């Protein structure tokens, strides 16, 4: 029975528990529930009182458990009355800690706590759902205070007793947390619902503040109790045991309210920060500060709970990435169409996501893809198949805690799909004690509150608010300059205004109560010149405006104060009268506005408008008198953000009586508003309707409040840092967290700490400035306290970097003039530069462990790749071929290193992987990364590109091998004898030496040095700090440099300027100190010296910052027009010390890099242009730098001579070093200085001195001087200023960064936009500064030098390299003079040495004609070194090399005249040179006898056929069977004047048995009749000439090495002289004074007049065709008329030159599949190639293609043909003498193929003859007929037209037309009716015309040009014959005898037919009948 009774109890209790929810809702069960409650309590209590024994049944225990559970869950049933529940709970809280109570009591308390925690927490707080004004929050706070008091009491008992916290206390704490959440949720709800009620918001915030204050107070008391017990020397036994057993962690931190409710409050409060007002935020800061202070006091006594950064705890925390979470994602296989699957991977704390793809992943190309997007917006898309370049096996997304995935598929094909694993990695969670966690959370909350107070978003204009239009119209401009000028002083209080005597005087003057005021007004009225509108009601208004002008203008205030103090005896300033007049002008404005307002009111029926404009103006002016007046420094040079619309600045152009409006305009135009800018600001404020008094006061009040709050926050920050520091160290966790929140939580960052606070008042500004500067100073003290950071652990190092970054961020503001005191006190320049030095990345040097065998193996591989590239078409093709190989992945790093080494040869652009800038030269390269390069700046800053790690090794690519021209990445072999000579180890071992270096030279081998980071860090802050602080320093430096020139002259002695000058000087000093820190030890010598770590950092920073330091110094130098007003003491750049340092760097005596030296000299040049830099100071600097001591007796006559002498000597030394960039820069510098008024006299004196000494002691200085005068060759060196056009835009200025001569491209920087772009060379022109100091005396000296040197050449005397160089430069300078001078200004002496000039111009250069003059000049400069006679060289001249490969040269051992003669016979008559040489030897080596012999053999035969004996003897001079193209790239050598051997034309002119050569099969030429290459392909010709000349230059430099022999240099310089002589001769002939001189063959140095065209033909090869046409015109008009016939004969012979041979290229017909045909066609000497296609050309369209180009890579002048359309296969021209073609076909169908003819064209003697004859026939008709045999000319031209084809024939036909037009004009001029020319000679051309007309009978297309030209020719000929009445004879002679017989026979037959038809018998009929019978 007992057993069943217990079971029934259990079942009954279970049923009762299940019915609890239903019983609660039932009424009238209170009595029953009370009985149940009593019964349950008795059950629990009885079981507790009974003795526990082992016999107690399990069911009994179950009954007790069920009874206990019913008590816990039945609070709502057992205590149905709310008030009863509350009372019961509060009554039981007093006895929470009583352990002797019954168990039921504890259960009841727990039940009530649980009820209010989970069911009705708000019921206990009695919080209303809707807040109203009657709400009293005190009862709510009283409830919470009760719970807090009990919790604090329990905490105190537990600490003092050392025991555990009772279970009831834990329930109480849980209830407290629930109530706290309910409270904060209710507060946030009320904030959101009461957004517009300010009073209710105040009530809520007040309630929150009091609660926080209450919690903080209780917490501080509890912490103090704990602190007292910890500090107690004699603690209780239990507390001591608890401390020793580490039980304190469990008791205090895990079970008390500090670890739960207080920490919870801090977290909840952080979510409400952005909704609080600033005053409450500040109050919370103060309250919470006490909490952090209490915990800070406790932390030293509990080191196991509060961990310092240098403790072992942080070192034990895992710092490596750990896996935080993984996801496995997989699609169906195969996936379905039209899918759009997305998923988000989010993991708080993650720093990276790693995605690993399955090897089977595959999607449809392009259409189905996987897209990943990280939290930064970076996207990566994958498709196709895993393992390709587009879809790697794994991908890492860094710096993100969120990753989004998208899969998209279209409606077509599907593939296998995707499967991947996403792994989120990050740092492991740090286990902290609850109390320490509370401390950190409180500090973060303090930072967040501070950031919220500092946020000024509410003060800024809300540009996105477009709600109310009317409101928007009335909104004042918060960006106006008035806030920072007129209103900056802020609104003054009334008691402050009363203290101002001036303000009171102005008010009394306005009211009329001041007698002195009336006197002042009378004086102003007497000086007023405008008309006064009689408006008495406006007098007070005008006086108020006038007073506002005076009050806000400092000079006027001082004048009025002086006037008042002197009792009216002192004179008033003129500005007072101007202010009065300016104020009077407001009358017209007010009247005008009144009228407009009246019209508007009448229109709107607004009769009672009380807003009178006069009253409004008066109110505003009175308000301005309440604004604190400022000093003038606040107004000066204040740029306006927008121009005022109300201030008129136009001066009246008509004369009339002045009105107030005229007065205002006069003031503005005369500069009154500029002199007193306050007038403009006051006027703008008064006139602008938006500026109302109420709105301005509101803004000023808001700004004052914000300024006070901001000041308090900064002061709080200082206090917090002071409170949180320990032993002066600020590197604590709490400080780091506080600063992070302080900066990170601000929604907007201001450029200055006073932004949007203008008008808060001067005092508040000063307070805020002190507070802001105070926090900077405090952080600075802590940073400077930690000197050496090498031995810091990782945690402290990270904290240091974080605080340093915060400090730099605070410094990164736009400092104003009133901040200069702080900047000077803090020594900001030194601070910033020292921070930059301290943050430089330090690396250790390690010797490379690569062996010689490995290095040689790499060298062989690189050389193999280099040869493959040279044989391939382009680098891209070679790289794609290498990349397509199967083993590319294995050797990719080696391929990228090969590209990095040979980037210049491969023409590959290298970019810095850190900053992205171009790296044309030196750089750092990683040995572990596949392709990673860094510039010096990024290297020093420790920049870490993606995938690059700290332990990677870097090498410095600085030296280049002088043989293979690659960067040396291994052992470097340095020659101790050659100048600046290095070899890579491979070239050294293979004995590949360039010319000039011998095996016997001593060498030194330096090992490769690798660099590795010594300070490893997972943070990128160090790099950020280094880059950011340098930018701050540069910005600050430029700001100081820009501040000084902007100061007007009258303010140069202000204290402001003195402070700015000091800071400016400090910046320069810091930069110069950095330049002095460059290690002076040679980089090749490894010295182990003991240096401090700081010193090592300084040197490392200085070493890698040279270029940017020099660039910053250059940007600081003021312009000439801005620095003239500054005194010498302010202008820091004019110091002798500064200039001396720059000269030291430029001279290369201080160990700086070459680029730094260039920049230093550029700075020197820039400074010398400034008039504020005294020349005497520069001279002293030069003397001190170069150690020059001038004797007193030999003082120069002009200041600056020492400097100029040094610059010219230095330039000469640059020539000696073969530094073409250096020399070019020095020439540009001196040319620029020649335009300066200061230096021009000195330079002119020096140049005149050097020119006068030419020929006496010629040296390098003389040569360099002539370069300055004549101009340096156009070298696209780094830093060269150019003018370019880009994409058809206007010309722009740029600076060269790199030049790629083989690509004809230049990489440059736009001077205005700073954008970098690549531009083709044809669109670039170098900006050259010309020295215009040449005079007649200089020209006379040049002429004398030229004559003397040419005489030596004629005599065969030896001349030095310097002499030939001076000769060429004198000619160049003379050419420059002639181009500028007019013909009348040129002296007769210049025209008198034309004979010597013609001789020199007639010499051959013995170089290829493809050489451009500027490239020859560059070759001479680059090969020149001093004392070459003393240097042994392995030099092989081109002739020597040619002899070795080609055998004996037929011109070997001959003088120049004999060489020209032999070459002419070979070119004109096609006689082999070997035969000509034998005949020359047989004729006693006499050219005259040789010419006679050749003429005799040509008498009866146009072709010369040598005898067998001569052929046998000629074998001696014949060349071996070696391809000429393999030896010499271009055989078109320049041998000077090509003499003419006139053949005997008697037989040709008497027989006239000519035949016109047929045109080529395809004559489908352009529709232009005459298409001259000079007009149509001049652009392509120029490109071709540049390309070939560039290749020749590179070839010569490769063969000659760094220097050539003296003989070879002489040859080069002489060639340059010859070319410049031709230019000078061209200039003289083109501007020949016909009235002063006649041109004869004697003047031109010719033996006969027939040679004059040869001279002109020589000039036609120059690069200036326009000038050549003028020269031909002048020669014809200025020569003797008797010489014209000889010139005509020679010109005709020029045109008779045989045409080049043609080449026909034919494919198979039809062509075969898979064809790949390519070849090269070269016709030497051709200027262009014409390509004519067969009409049958056709290929498979789009598949089979023929490509023709002028370059081997088939890219330049590219023409592609494919398809059947005839119009596609058009003829075209290619410039140059070489073309490349390639034909490819696929494996499908084929067609007929292709067939084209290549015809060579020549710009040479034919064109010379054509131009001469064309100009001659355009001259005077009388002169032509008197001196020219027209019949002979006609016959010669007809012969030429028959023998030439194509364009040459067209040009000849044009001349024939001119001759016939001349005959027509002659008929009108004279009486004779006879024709001078024989029209019958046109018979061969008539036959050609008939044949061509048959071929072009298709009238649907335009006839070819030759047909149209012949048509015109015969039409004109027929008209001419008709004019001379010889048409019948003319037509008869055009027909042959057979044609006449055939025509006569056909006529007889026709007559006979007609006779037969009419029955008439005649002779014709009989003859035909007789013939038919036979």
Image (cartoon, rainbow, N blue to C red):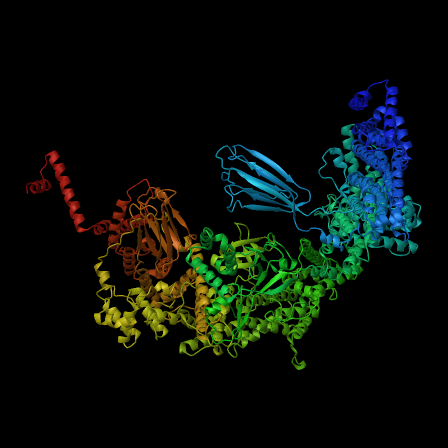
| Image-based side of 1492 in relation to 615, left or right | left
Q: Is residue 1585 visible in the rendered structure shown here? A: no
Q: Is residue 881 visible in the rendered structure shown here? A: yes
Q: Can you say whether 489 is above or below 604 in the image?
A: below
**Residue found at the far bottom of this picture:** 1193
Viewer-side residue, 1925 vs 316: 316
Viewer-side residue, 148 vs 1403: 148
| Image-based side of 883 in relation to 929, left or right | left
At 89% from the left and 54% from the top, the residue drawn is: 561
Viewer-side residue, 97 vs 673: 97
What x and y, as percent, mark residue 198?
A: 83, 34
Q: Can you say whether 673 is above or below 857 in the image?
A: above
What x and y, as percent, mark residue 1128?
A: 73, 66
What x and y, as percent, mark residue 518?
A: 90, 48
- From the image, which quarter does the N terminus lie in? top right
- From the image, which quarter does the C terminus lie in? top left
Residue 254 placement: quadrant: top right
Residue 113 placement: quadrant: top right
**Residue found at the far top of this picture:** 28
At 77% from the left and 32% from the top, the residue drawn is: 599
Image mark count: 0
What x and y, as percent, mark residue 1527?
A: 37, 65
């Amino acid at each position: 029975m007992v057993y069943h009774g217990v079971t029934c109890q259990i079942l009954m209790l279970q049923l009762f528990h299940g019915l609890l929810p239903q019983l609660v809702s039932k009424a009238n069960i209170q009595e029953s529930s009370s009985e149940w409650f009593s019964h349950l309590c008795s059950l629990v209590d009885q079981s507790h009182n009974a003795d526990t024994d082992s016999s107690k049944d399990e069911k009994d225990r179950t009954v007790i458990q069920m009874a206990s559970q019913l008590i816990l869950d039945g609070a709502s049933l057992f205590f149905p009355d709310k008030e009863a529940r509350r009372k019961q709970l509060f009554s039981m809280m007093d006895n929470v800690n009583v352990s002797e109570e019954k168990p039921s009591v504890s259960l009841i308390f727990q039940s009530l706590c649980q009820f209010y925690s989970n069911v009705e927490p708000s019921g206990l707080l009695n919080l209303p759902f809707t807040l109203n004004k009657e709400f009293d929050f005190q009862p709510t706070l009283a409830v919470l205070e009760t719970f807090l008091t009990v919790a604090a009491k329990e905490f105190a008992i537990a600490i003092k007793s050392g025991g555990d916290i009772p279970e009831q206390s834990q329930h109480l704490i849980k209830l407290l947390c629930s109530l706290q959440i309910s409270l904060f949720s209710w507060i946030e709800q009320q904030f959101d619902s009461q957004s517009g009620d300010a009073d209710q918001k105040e009530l809520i915030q007040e309630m929150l503040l009091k609660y926080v204050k209450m919690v903080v107070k209780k917490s501080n008391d509890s912490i103090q109790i704990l602190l007292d017990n910890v500090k107690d020397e004699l603690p209780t036994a239990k507390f001591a045991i608890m401390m020793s057993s580490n039980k304190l962690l469990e008791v205090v931190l895990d079970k008390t309210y500090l670890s739960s409710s207080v920490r919870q409050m801090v977290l909840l409060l952080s979510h409400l920060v952005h909704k609080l007002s600033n005053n409450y935020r500040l109050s919370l800061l103060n309250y919470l500060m006490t909490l952090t202070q209490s915990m800070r006091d406790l932390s030293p006594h509990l080191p196991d709970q509060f961990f310092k950064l240098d403790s072992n705890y942080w070192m034990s925390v895992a710092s490596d990435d750990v896996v935080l979470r993984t996801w496995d994602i997989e699609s169906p296989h195969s996936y379905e169409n039209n899918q759009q699957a997305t998923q988000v991977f989010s993991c708080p704390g993650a720093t990276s996501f790693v995605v690993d793809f399955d090897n089977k992943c595959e999607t449809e190309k392009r259409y189905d893809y996987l897209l990943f997007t990280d939290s930064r917006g970076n996207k990566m898309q994958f498709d196709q198949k895993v393992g390709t370049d587009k879809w790697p096996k794994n991908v890492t997304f860094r710096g993100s805690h969120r990753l989004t995935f998208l899969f998209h598929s279209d409606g077509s094909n599907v593939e296998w799909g995707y499967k991947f694993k996403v792994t989120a990695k990050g740092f492991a969670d740090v286990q902290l004690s609850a109390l320490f966690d509370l401390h950190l959370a409180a500090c973060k909350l303090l930072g967040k509150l501070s950031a919220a107070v500092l946020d000024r978003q509410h003060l800024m204009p809300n540009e996105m608010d477009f709600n109310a239009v009317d409101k928007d119209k009335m909104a004042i401009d918060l960006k106006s300059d008035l806030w920072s000028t007129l209103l900056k002083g802020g609104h003054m209080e009334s008691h402050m205004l009363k203290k101002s005597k001036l303000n009171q005087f102005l008010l009394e003057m306005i009211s009329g109560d001041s007698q002195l005021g009336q006197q002042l007004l009378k004086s102003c009225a007497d000086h007023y010149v405008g008309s006064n509108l009689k408006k008495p009601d406006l007098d007070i208004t005008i006086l108020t405006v006038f007073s506002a002008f005076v009050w806000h203008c400092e000079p006027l205030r001082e004048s009025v104060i002086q006037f008042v103090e002197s009792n009216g005896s002192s004179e008033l300033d003129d500005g007072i009268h101007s202010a009065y007049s300016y104020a009077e002008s407001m009358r017209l404005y007010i009247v005008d506005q009144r009228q407009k307002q009246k019209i508007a009111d009448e229109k709107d029926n607004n009769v009672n408008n009380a807003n009178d404009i006069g009253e409004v103006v008066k109110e505003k002016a009175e308000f301005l008198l309440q604004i604190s007046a400022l000093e003038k420094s606040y107004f000066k040079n204040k740029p306006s953000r927008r121009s005022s619309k109300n201030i008129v600045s136009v001066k009246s152009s008509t004369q009339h009586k002045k009105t107030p409006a005229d007065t205002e305009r006069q003031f503005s135009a005369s500069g009154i508003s500029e002199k007193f800018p306050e007038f403009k600001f006051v006027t703008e404020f008064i006139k602008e309707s938006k500026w109302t008094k109420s709105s301005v006061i509101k803004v000023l009040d808001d700004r004052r409040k914000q300024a006070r709050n901001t000041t308090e926050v900064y002061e709080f920050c200082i206090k917090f840092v002071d409170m949180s520091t320990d032993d002066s160290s600020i590197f604590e966790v709490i400080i780091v967290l506080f600063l992070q929140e302080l900066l990170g939580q601000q929604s907007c960052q201001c450029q200055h700490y006073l932004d949007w606070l203008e008008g808060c008042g001067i005092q508040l500004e000063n307070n805020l400035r002190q507070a802001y500067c105070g926090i900077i100073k405090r952080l600075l003290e802590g940073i400077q306290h930690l000197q050496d950071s090498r031995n810091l652990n990782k945690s402290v190092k990270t904290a240091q970097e974080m605080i340093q970054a915060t400090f730099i961020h605070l410094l990164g503001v736009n400092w104003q003039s009133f901040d200069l005191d702080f900047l000077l006190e803090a020594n900001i320049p030194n601070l910033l530069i020292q921070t930059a030095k301290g943050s430089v990345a330090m690396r250790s040097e390690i010797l490379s462990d690569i062996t010689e065998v490995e290095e040689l193996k790499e060298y062989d591989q690189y050389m193999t790749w280099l040869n493959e590239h040279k044989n391939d078409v382009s680098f891209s093709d070679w790289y794609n071929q290498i990349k397509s190989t199967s083993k590319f992945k294995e050797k990719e790093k080696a391929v990228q290193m090969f590209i990095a080494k040979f980037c210049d040869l491969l023409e590959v652009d290298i970019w810095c992987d850190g900053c992205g800038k171009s790296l044309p030269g030196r750089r750092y390269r990683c040995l572990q990364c596949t392709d990673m390069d860094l510039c010096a700046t990024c290297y020093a800053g420790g920049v870490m590109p993606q995938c690059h790690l700290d332990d990677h090794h870097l090498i410095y690519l600085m030296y280049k091998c002088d043989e293979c021209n690659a960067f040396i990445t291994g052992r470097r072999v340095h020659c101790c004898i050659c100048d600046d000579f290095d070899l890579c180890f491979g070239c050294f071992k293979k004995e590949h030496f360039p010319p000039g270096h011998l095996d016997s030279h001593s060498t030194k081998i330096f090992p490769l040095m690798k660099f590795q980071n010594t300070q490893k860090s997972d943070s990128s802050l160090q790099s950020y700090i280094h880059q950011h602080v340098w930018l701050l320093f540069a910005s600050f430096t430029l700001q100081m440099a820009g501040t000084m020139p902007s100061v007007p002259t009258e303010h140069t002695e202000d204290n402001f300027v003195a402070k700015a000058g000091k800071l400016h000087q400090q910046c320069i000093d810091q930069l110069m100190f950095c330049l002095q820190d460059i290690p002076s030890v040679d980089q090749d010598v490894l010295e182990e010296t003991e240096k401090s770590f700081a010193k090592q950092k300084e040197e490392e920073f200085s070493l890698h910052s040279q270029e940017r330091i020099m660039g910053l110094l250059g940007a600081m130098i003021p312009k000439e027009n801005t620095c003239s007003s500054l005194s010498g003491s302010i202008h820091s750049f004019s110091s002798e010390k500064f200039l001396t340092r720059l000269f030291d760097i430029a001279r290369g005596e201080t160990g700086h890099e070459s680029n730094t030296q260039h920049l230093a000299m550029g700075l020197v040049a820039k400074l010398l242009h400034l008039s504020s830099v005294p020349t005497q100071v520069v001279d002293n600097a030069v003397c001190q730098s170069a150690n020059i001591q001038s004797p007193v007796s030999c003082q120069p006559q002009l200041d600056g001579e020492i400097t100029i002498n040094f610059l010219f000597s230095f330039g000469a030394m640059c020539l000696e070093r073969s530094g073409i960039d250096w020399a070019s820069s020095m020439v540009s510098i001196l040319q620029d200085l020649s335009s300066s008024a200061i230096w021009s006299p000195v330079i002119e004196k020096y140049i005149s001195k050097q020119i006068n000494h030419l020929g006496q002691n010629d040296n390098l200085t003389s040569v360099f001087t002539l370069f300055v005068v004549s101009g340096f060759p156009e070298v696209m060196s780094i830093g060269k200023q150019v003018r370019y056009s880009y994409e058809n835009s206007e010309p722009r200025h740029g600076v060269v960064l790199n030049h790629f001569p083989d690509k004809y491209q230049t990489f440059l920087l736009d001077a205005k936009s700073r954008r970098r772009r690549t531009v083709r060379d044809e669109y670039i022109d170098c900006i050259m500064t010309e020295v215009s100091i040449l005079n007649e005396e200089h020209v006379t000296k040049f002429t004398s030098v030229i004559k003397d040197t040419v005489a030596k050449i004629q005599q065969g005397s030896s001349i030095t390299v310097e002499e030939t160089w001076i000769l060429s430069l004198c000619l160049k300078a003379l050419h420059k003079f002639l181009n500028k001078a007019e013909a009348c200004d040129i002296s007769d002496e210049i025209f008198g040495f034309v004979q010597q000039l013609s001789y020199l111009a007639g010499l051959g250069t013995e170089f290829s004609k493809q050489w451009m003059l500027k490239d020859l000049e560059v070759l001479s400069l680059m090969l020149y070194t001093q004392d070459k006679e003393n240097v042994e060289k392995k030099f092989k001249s081109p002739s020597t090399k040619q002899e070795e490969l080609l055998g004996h040269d037929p011109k070997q051992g001959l003088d120049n005249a004999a060489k020209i003669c032999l070459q002419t016979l070979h070119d004109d008559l096609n006689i082999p040179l070997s035969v000509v040489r034998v005949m020359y030897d047989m004729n006693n080596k006499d050219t005259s006898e040789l010419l006679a012999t050749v003429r005799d053999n040509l008498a009866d035969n146009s072709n010369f056929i040598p005898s067998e004996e001569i052929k046998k003897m000629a074998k001696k001079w014949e060349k071996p069977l070696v391809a000429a193209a393999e030896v010499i790239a271009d055989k078109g050598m320049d041998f000077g004047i090509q003499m003419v051997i006139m053949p005997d034309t008697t037989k040709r002119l008497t027989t006239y048995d000519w035949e016109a050569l047929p045109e080529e099969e395809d004559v489908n030429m352009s529709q232009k009749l005459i298409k001259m290459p000079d007009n149509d392909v001049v652009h392509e010709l120029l490109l071709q000439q540049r390309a070939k000349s560039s290749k020749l230059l590179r070839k010569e430099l490769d063969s000659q090495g760094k220097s050539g022999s003296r003989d070879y240099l002489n040859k080069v310089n002489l060639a340059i002289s010859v070319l410049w002589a031709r230019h000078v001769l061209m200039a003289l002939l083109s501007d020949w004074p016909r009235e002063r001189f006649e041109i004869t063959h004697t003047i031109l140095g010719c033996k006969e007049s027939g040679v004059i065209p040869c001279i002109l033909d020589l000039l036609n090869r120059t690069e200036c065709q326009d000038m050549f046409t003028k020269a031909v015109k002048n020669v014809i008009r200025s020569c003797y008329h008797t010489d014209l016939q000889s010139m005509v004969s020679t010109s005709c012979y020029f045109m008779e030159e045989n045409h080049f041979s043609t080449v026909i290229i034919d494919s198979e017909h039809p062509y075969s599949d898979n064809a790949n045909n390519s070849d090269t066609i070269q016709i030497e000497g051709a200027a262009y190639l014409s390509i004519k296609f067969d009409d049958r050309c056709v290929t498979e369209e789009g598949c089979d293609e023929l490509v023709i180009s002028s370059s081997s890579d088939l890219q330049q002048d590219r023409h592609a043909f494919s398809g059947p359309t005839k119009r596609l296969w058009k003829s075209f021209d290619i410039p140059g003498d070489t073309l490349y073609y390639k034909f490819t076909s696929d494996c499908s169908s084929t067609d007929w193929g292709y067939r084209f003819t290549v015809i060579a064209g020549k710009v040479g003697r034919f064109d010379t003859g054509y131009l001469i004859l064309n100009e001659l026939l355009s001259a005077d008709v009388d002169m032509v007929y008197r001196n020219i045999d027209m019949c002979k000319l006609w016959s010669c031209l007809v012969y030429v037209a028959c023998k030439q084809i194509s364009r040459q024939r067209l040009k000849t036909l044009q001349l024939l037309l001119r001759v016939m037009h001349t005959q027509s004009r002659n008929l009108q001029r004279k009486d004779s009716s006879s024709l001078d020319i024989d029209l019958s000679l046109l018979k061969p051309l008539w036959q050609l015309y008939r044949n061509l007309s048959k071929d072009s009978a298709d009238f649907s297309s335009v006839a070819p040009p030759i047909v149209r030209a012949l048509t015109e020719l015969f039409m004109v000929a027929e008209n001419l014959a008709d004019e001379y009445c010889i048409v019948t004879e003319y037509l008869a002679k055009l027909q042959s005898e057979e044609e006449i017989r055939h025509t006569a026979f056909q006529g007889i037959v026709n007559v006979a037919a007609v006779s037969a038809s009419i029955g008439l018998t005649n002779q014709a009929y009989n003859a035909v009948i007789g013939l038919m019978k036979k």
